Amino acid sequence: MTVERGLRWADVDPARPREGMTGPVLPASVLDATPECLFVTGPDGRIVFANRRVQELTGFAPSDLEGASAQLLLPEDLRAEQRGTFESRCHRADGATIAVEVHLGRIEGPEPLVVVTLRDITEGRNAEARIAFLAYHDSLTGLPNRELFEELLAGAIARARRHDLAVAVVVLNLDNFRLVNDSLGHQAGDELLAELAARLRVCTRETDVVARLGGDEFLLLLADLPRGSGPQQDDQPLQISESVGARVHEALREAFLLSGAEFYASASLGISLFPRDSMDAQTLLKNADAAMHHSKRVAAGGSVVFCEDDDDEDDAMERLSLSTRLRRAVESQHWVLHYQPIVDLGDCSVMGVESLVRWHDPNGGIVPPGEFIPLAEEMGLIDAIGDWVVDEMTSQHRIWCDEGLDLQVSFNLSPRQLSSPDLARHILGKLQAGRIDPSRVMVEITESTAMADPDRTQTILTELRSWGLTLAIDDFGTGYSSFARLKHMPVQVLKIDRSFVHDVNRDRDLAGMVRAMIQLAQSLGMTPLAEGVETRAEYEFLHANGCRLAQGYLFSRPVPPDQIAALARGRLLPDSG
Ligand code: C2E
Ligand code: CA
Ligand code: CA
């Protein structure tokens, strides 16, 4: 580059005269010809000259720039800038910014000038970002790799320590990946892994990390999980990780389309929790891995929660996670149905029974429904359980009828069951197959379920009603019913939630509410039924205030069917002494 010194701008380039400008100058034609992108600023920080390359880079014409402050292009105040070379962001005429390397050359004199050279480093930046991304991500699936996972895990553990939270690590390994690679080829194997990655992203929460370790092994990180207090403080994080695991198994149930062929994959999961199982990242990963291998041995396609001495096979079943055991329970129908008498408060006779399901876990004893119904709903298993309940209840009703006992039987419907469009027909089909008169059957739907989608509920209830079934709103008082809605629901029984009944004889507020609920039921032509009656005083209050029906430990707990006949033949209340 030729630099001619001692010339004025006007002398070199008559097209761009600069009045009163003295000092060293460069001929514009020369500067336009260089491959460098450069402009010159005067003592006031304004641009006195910009070459053609600046226009190419920024989109500003020299006439836009000359006379304008250099801060139109760069955020720095170049007059004060001490650095000779630095990286910055250059503003373009279209509003975008680009990464540039800036070089400043000072020309001292009575009117000092600064020659600013710009170099576009966006390309390099992008390449660097790409390289950084590749270093931390798996190229096949785009998921974080082991390194990034470990960094994120370390961060999650640090947060959990500070805020008393829990962290779950889940290791996932496909059960039949070799089969794909061997029979369908590597291309199909890659397709499977990419599709699996996509499904894992969908079935986890936004904040969960899904990473690929390599091969067919994936990791999930569930961070910032709330903990409870007391000895059960890890129940909640356990439940959350179990339900994520359940969702993963669920997401795998659909066939994978690999090179045009359908393929069914299953995976084994191992779960370990901070701080429950370990306080450090490496041990957590090791534990989750051990649990995953454990699952492979005893329950491929299931989940196992880590447990100390995990290589001990004796109580293998006990270590299967709740979701895995639940799935097995559905397959082998490990259910029992207990029945709780519903009592007519007029004469304390048994007018019917409510069916309440229990899980007979061969290793865990009798599990109450509160502990597995929510998970079963989430896993999509509730329909199978609900079907079993109706079948079992109808055949039990037959047995009672044969013994000369014609009780009304009721069963509970869960929210998820209500989303099936032909639920009413489905139930009716079962009742017909079991040869039970629909008018002897009552269906219970909780208030919050009924009000969640009142139009759909009303349609289903109306159809059930038209077949002659009795309908009840369960847990009344715990949801938010609109009076107008309630009025139009074809419901005959209002079950007052037991939280209102407990101590109703002692608490004046409760007493007022329960009286109001009884009156509400009566004014809507419904029969009030009080749940959870435990004391004689509660019973007397309810009876005195016009409540027709009741259930509760005072009369009987839910019992196996063979105890019902004896209960139903007597009166369920000892005479007051
Ligand atoms: P729910 O329908 O409100 O059932 C009444 C629950 O109250 C039962 O608990 C029963 O044992 C309990 N209970 C009855 N009397 C008393 C009492 O005097 N005091 C106290 N403290 N509790 C009493 P359970 O059997 O544990 O059932 C809990 C819930 O599980 C049921 O609440 C129901 O929502 C659900 N569930 C039970 N069986 C089924 C089923 O077959 N299908 C569906 N979808 N849900 C069911
Ligand atoms: Ca109920
Ligand atoms: Ca209830």
Image (cartoon, grey):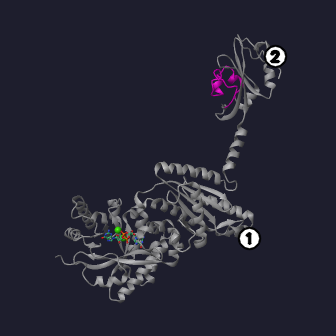
Q: Does residue 413 lie above or below 561 as drawn?
A: above
* Earlier-in-chain disc, 1 versus 2: 2
Ligand 2 is found in the corner quadrant, namely bottom left
Residue 460's image quarter?
bottom left
Give, as a three-letter code, the residue at label 1.
Ser
Left or right position of 442 against 554:
right
Residue at horizontal 72 percent and vertical 23 percent from the top: 39
Residue 537 drawn at (x, y percent): 21, 69
Ligand 1 within 8 Å of the CB at mark 2: no
* 516 left or right of 1 in image: left
Circle 2 sits on which residue?
4
Name the residue type under label 2: Glu
Is 82 inside the magenta-drawn segment? yes
The secondary element bearing badge 1 is classed as: helix
On the image, numbered disc 1 is attached to which residue? 183
Question: The residue tagged with tag 2: helix, strand or loop?
Answer: loop
Residues rendered magenta in the picture: 60-87
Nearest to the observer: residue 310 or residue 131: 310
